[in-house]
C-alpha cells in the first residue's frame, strides 16, 4: 500500500493540467507510458476523454460535438468503430458519409483534441451484434477466439481501416493517441486470440500505442500481459480494483491507469424506466479519479440515437444515456456541472460552449392506412423444404416472412422452437399469436385451429443480435423447422423484407388487422431538431423522407422518436409508419415536440403467454 501511495503522490506532481497539455497540431509527437503517466514529448499528461459513436451521430453534427467535448474540459474523444457499418457485405467497404472515420479524425485534429480509437473487431456498445457483420454467421466459425478463418476476416477489415487511419497516429503527426484491441474479452474465450489479434493490428499499420480493456479484476488479473499493450479497465464501481490495478501497473511497468468507461448512466431497455445518474454522484466520481491521477473516459459524453434496426435486442432507440450532451445535441445541467468542476479543479481556461441546436415543434398532421405488410412481399420467394435463417437468405436486418399453405386446414400447437426474433403468427393474414423472448418461453407455442384451406404466415423481426461469445448463436429468423404437435413442418416459401426504404408502397385495403403501413405528409417552413410523438401508435418503425428513425413501442418508457434536422426538408416531408400491432392506432395523427416523451413503462410479463 505504501508503493501505491508513493505512486499516486508522484503522478499528482508530474501530471500536466489538461489545459496545458500538448495537443495534436499536425506534427509528430512521442507518446510514452512511464512514471505512472501518459507522457507526450516528455510532458506527463492526464487524459480525460469522452465517448461518442459515428453511426449514432449524423456527420453534420460531428464538428459541433467535438467542440462541445473540448469546451466541457475534455482533451480526448473516444470512438468505437462498428465493423458492420464499414463492411456491410463481405469484401465491400464503405468509408463515406457517416462511415468517414478519416474525416472525423481530421476534425479532432483541427479542434486540437486527441482521438482514442476503438475499432473492435467486436465492440459491444449495445449495438447490433456488438458491431460484428451478419455475413459472418453463415460461415459457421467460432468467434472471438483463435480461428484462422475469423482472423483472416479481422485482418481484412483492420487493413482497410488502417489505410484510412494509420497515418493519423500521434507518432506520424495525427490525433490518434492510442488504439484499443477488441473489447471486454473474457479469459474463458482464450488468450491466444488476443495475442494474435494484437499482432494483426501491428502488421496492418496500427504500430502506435495499443491497449485493451476489461471490467473489474479481469482487466489485469485474468489475462496474460501482452508486451507493450496497456491494460485498461471498464467501470469504477469497484474502486478497490482500480487501486489494485494502479499498484500493479506502477510496480511492474510504470504504466498509467486508464479507465476506458466511466459511465454517465446506463442504457435503457423497452419496458423499463429510463436510466439516470445523479450529478452529485458524477462529480464525486470525477474528484475521486482526478485526486488519484486516474486517466479516464466518460461513457458516454454524447450517446445520441440507435437509428434504424441497429439497437441490440430490447434496447430502446434513444441512446441518450443521461450523457452531458443529450440525444439531440443540447448541453445539460450535468455538462455545466462538469465544466465548472474541471475549470475550478484544474484551473482551465476553456473555449466558449457552442450554441444549442434550434429545436422546433411540428403541428399535428394526419396519416392514412396505405397497405398491409403482406402487400409488399417480393414476387419470387425462396422455396425450400427446411426454413432458412435470415443470414442464409443474404439478409442482415429487418423482417423475414415464412409462408406455408394448408389446403385441409390446420390444427395443433405450433412450436417456433429456437427463434430469437419477435414473431407474429398469422392465419389468412389475421394475427393469432405473438412470440418474443421477453414474453417468456410459452409464447413460442401457439395453438391453431382452422378447418378450411388457409395460409400460415410467420413474420419474424430481427430485434438486434445480442453480444456474442465464441459460438455463432445469433442467427435470426427461424433457425429451426417449427413443429405442429411435435412433427416438423416442411415446405416453406420465404420472403426477405429488409425494408431499408419502404417509400414505394402499393395501394391496399383501407382497413384490416395485422402489420400495416401508414403514410402521411407534413410541411415545414423551417427545419430543426424535434421529437415525433408516437403515443397514438403501438409498436413498429418510422421512416421520414426515406430515413429509418428506429423503433417505437408502447411498453415505453420512451414514447417518441428523434427526427434530426438534416433529414428534414423545407416544404413537404413524407412519413411512413409500419405498425405491427393487431389493432389500428388510437388516432392517425402525429406531432413534433421539443423534448423526449416518457411515460411509466409497462413491464414485460414473466413466463406468461401474452394476450393477443
Image (spheres, rainbow, N blue to C red):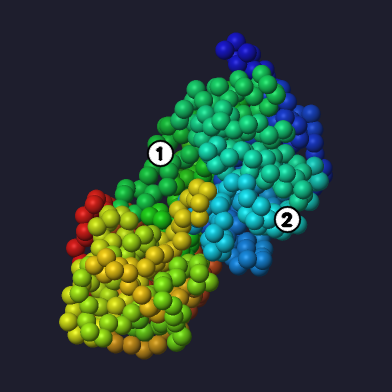
Q: Is residue 192 left or right of residue 574?
A: right
Q: Where residue 525 appears, x then y in whole percent?
A: 46, 74
**Residue under the point 54% across and 32% down:** 218
Q: Quadrant of the C terminus?
A: bottom left
Q: Which residue is mark 1?
A: 277
Q: What is the x, y in percent for residue 575?
A: 41, 76
Comparing 358 with 132, the one in front is: 132
Give the residue drawn at x 79%, y 29%.
42
Q: Distance of mark 2 from mark 1, alpha carbons?
A: 39 Å
Left or right: residue 538 versus residue 136 is: left
The residue lying furthest to the top in this view is 2
Mark 1 neighbour class, 10 Å CA radius: few under 14, some 14 to 19, many 20 or more: some
The residue singled out by tag 2 in the image is: 159
Instruction: Using the image, determine if residue 528 lies above or below residue 346.
Output: below
Q: Nearer the viewer, residue 495 or 368?
A: 495
In this image, 43 relative to 447: left or right?
right
Q: Residue at x 73, y 44 (%)?
A: 199
Residue 302 location (% of width, % of height): 52, 49
What residue is at 58 percent from the left and 29 percent from the top?
220
Above or below — where is 48 with respect to 27? above
Label of residue 474 in the image: none
Position of residue 250 measured from the top left corner of the image (x, y, whole percent): 66, 21
**Which element is circle 1 on?**
loop
Q: Quadrant of residue 19?
A: top right
Within 10 angstroms of label 2, few (less than 14), some, or many (20 or more) residues?
A: some
Query: Does dot 2 land on a helix, a strand or a loop?
Result: helix
Specify whether residue 274 is in view: yes
Specify the quadrant of the image occupied by residue 362: bottom left
Q: Quadrant of the N terminus?
A: top right
The mark nearer the N terminus, 2 or 1, is: 2
Q: Between tags 2 and 1, which lies in front?
A: 2
Amino acid at each position: 500500500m505504501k508503493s501505491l501511495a508513493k505512486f499516486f503522490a508522484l503522478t499528482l506532481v508530474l501530471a500536466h493540467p489538461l489545459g496545458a497539455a500538448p495537443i495534436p497540431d499536425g506534427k509528430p509527437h512521442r507518446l510514452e507510458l512511464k512514471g505512472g503517466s501518459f507522457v507526450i514529448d516528455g510532458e506527463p499528461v492526464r487524459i480525460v476523454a469522452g465517448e461518442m459513436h459515428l453511426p449514432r451521430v449524423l456527420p453534420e453534427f460531428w464538428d459541433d460535438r467535438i467542440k462541445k467535448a473540448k469546451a466541457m474540459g475534455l482533451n480526448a474523444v473516444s470512438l468505437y468503430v462498428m465493423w458492420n457499418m464499414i463492411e456491410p457485405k463481405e469484401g465491400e467497404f464503405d468509408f463515406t458519409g457517416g462511415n468517414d472515420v478519416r474525416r472525423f479524425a481530421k476534425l479532432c485534429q483541427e479542434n486540437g483534441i486527441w482521438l482514442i480509437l476503438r475499432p473492435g473487431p467486436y465492440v459491444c456498445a449495445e449495438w447490433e451484434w456488438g458491431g460484428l457483420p451478419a455475413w459472418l454467421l453463415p460461415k459457421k466459425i467460432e468467434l472471438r477466439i483463435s480461428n484462422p478463418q475469423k482472423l483472416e476476416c479481422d485482418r481484412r477489415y483492420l487493413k482497410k481501416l488502417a489505410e484510412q487511419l494509420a497515418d493519423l497516429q500521434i507518432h506520424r503527426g495525427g490525433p490518434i493517441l492510442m488504439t484499443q484491441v477488441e473489447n471486454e474479452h473474457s479469459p474463458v474465450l482464450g488468450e491466444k486470440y488476443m495475442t494474435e489479434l494484437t499482432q494483426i493490428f501491428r502488421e496492418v499499420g496500427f504500430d502506435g500505442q495499443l491497449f485493451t480493456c476489461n471490467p473489474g479484476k479481469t482487466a489485469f488479473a485474468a489475462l496474460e500481459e501482452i508486451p507493450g499493450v496497456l491494460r485498461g479497465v471498464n467501470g469504477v464501481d469497484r474502486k478497490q480494483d482500480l487501486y489494485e490495478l494502479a499498484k500493479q501497473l506502477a510496480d511492474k511497468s510504470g504504466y498509467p491507469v486508464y479507465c476506458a468507461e466511466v459511465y454517465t448512466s446506463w442504457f435503457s431497455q423497452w419496458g423499463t424506466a429510463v436510466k439516470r445518474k445523479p450529478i452529485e454522484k458524477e462529480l464525486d466520481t470525477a474528484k475521486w479519479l482526478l485526486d488519484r491521477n486516474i486517466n479516464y473516459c466518460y461513457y458516454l459524453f454524447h450517446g445520441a440515437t440507435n437509428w434504424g434496426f441497429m439497437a441490440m435486442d430490447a434496447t430502446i432507440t434513444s441512446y441518450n444515456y443521461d450523457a452531458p450532451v443529450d440525444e439531440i445535441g443540447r448541453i445539460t445541467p450535468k455538462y455545466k456541472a462538469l465544466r465548472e468542476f474541471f475549470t475550478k479543479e484544474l484551473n482551465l481556461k476553456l473555449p466558449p460552449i457552442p450554441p444549442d441546436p434550434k429545436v422546433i415543434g411540428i403541428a399535428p398532421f394526419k396519416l392514412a392506412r396505405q397497405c398491409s405488410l403482406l402487400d409488399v412481399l417480393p414476387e419470387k420467394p425462396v422455396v425450400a423444404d427446411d426454413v432458412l435463417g435470415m443470414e442464409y437468405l443474404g439478409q442482415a436486418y429487418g423482417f423475414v416472412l415464412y409462408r406455408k399453405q394448408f389446403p385441409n386446414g390446420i390444427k395443433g400447437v405450433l412450436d417456433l422452437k429456437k427463434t430469437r426474433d419477435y414473431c407474429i403468427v398469422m392465419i389468412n393474414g389475421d394475427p393469432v399469436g405473438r412470440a418474443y423472448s421477453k414474453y417468456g418461453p410459452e409464447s413460442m407455442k401457439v395453438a391453431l385451429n382452422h378447418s378450411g384451406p388457409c395460409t400460415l404466415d410467420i413474420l419474424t423481426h430481427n430485434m438486434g443480435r445480442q453480444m456474442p461469445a465464441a459460438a455463432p448463436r445469433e442467427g435470426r429468423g427461424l433457425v429451426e423447422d417449427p413443429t405442429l404437435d411435435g412433427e416438423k413442418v416442411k415446405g416453406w416459401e420465404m420472403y426477405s423484407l429488409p425494408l431499408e426504404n419502404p417509400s414505394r408502397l402499393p395501394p391496399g385495403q383501407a382497413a384490416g388487422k395485422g402489420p400495416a403501413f401508414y403514410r402521411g405528409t407534413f410541411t415545414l417552413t423551417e427545419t430543426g431538431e424535434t421529437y415525433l410523438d408516437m403515443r397514438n401508435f403501438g409498436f413498429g418503425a418510422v421512416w421520414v423522407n426515406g430515413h429509418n428513425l428506429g423503433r417505437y413501442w408502447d411498453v415505453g418508457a420512451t414514447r417518441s422518436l428523434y427526427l434530426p434536422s438534416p433529414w428534414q426538408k423545407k416544404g413537404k416531408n413524407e412519413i411512413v409508419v409500419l405498425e405491427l400491432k393487431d389493432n389500428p392506432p388510437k388516432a392517425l395523427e402525429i406531432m413534433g415536440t421539443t423534448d423526449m416523451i416518457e411515460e411509466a413503462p409497462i413491464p414485460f410479463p414473466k413466463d406468461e403467454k401474452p394476450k393477443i
